[in-house]
Amino acid sequence: MSEIICTDYAVTLQHDNGLITITTAATSRDIAVHMILAFERAPRAAVVRVQRRPICDYCDVMAMRIGDGVPLCVLHAREHYARWRQDTRKLGIRSFEEA
């Protein structure tokens, strides 16, 4: 059985009231965009930006925290930072990469 790997995407759309950003998990950038456009009933032209959650620098798991500007999974954040809750911060949308 093959594994399905999902990544978190943040899709920013031009909306009536300005820009909105919606996050979703998908297997590809295109699927993420199609899901958000269908949910919002928006045209393709409404897409302003698509970003992807970074992968941990030490393994192939999605990064959940960031320390010293380096994306880390929870396991490696704990391994590299003794007081990891104080020394690392949660990965926000601003830390997502362009997809």
Image (cartoon, grey):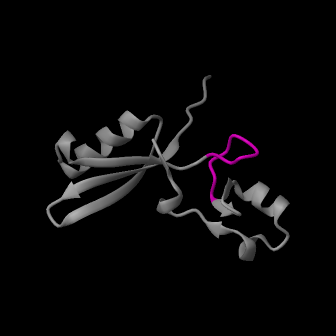
**Looking at the image, is 63 positioned above or below residue 19?**
above
Q: Residue furthest front?
A: 69
67 or 1, nearer to the observer: 67
Q: Is residue 7 magenta?
A: no
Residue at the image point whose x is 38% and y is 41% from the top: 32
Q: Quadrant of residue 77?
A: bottom right
Q: Is the magenta region chiefly helix, strand or loop? A: loop
65 or 31, nearer to the observer: 65
Left or right: 21 in relation to 27: left
Q: Residue furthest left?
A: 16
Give the magenta-colored segment's residue range: 55-64
Residue at the image point whose x is 53% and y is 50% from the top: 53
63 or 27, nearer to the observer: 63
Q: How far across and down, in percent of the image, does residue 20 sit?
A: 29, 61
Q: How far across and down, in percent of the image, does residue 29 sit?
A: 41, 37
Q: Quadrant of residue 84?
A: bottom right
User: Which quadrant of the rendered structure holds the N terminus?
Assistant: top right
Residue at the image point whose x is 35% and y is 56% from the top: 22
Q: How far across and down, in percent of the image, does residue 90 sit?
A: 61, 67
- Count of numbered labels shown in the rendering: 0
Left or right: 25 in relation to 20: right
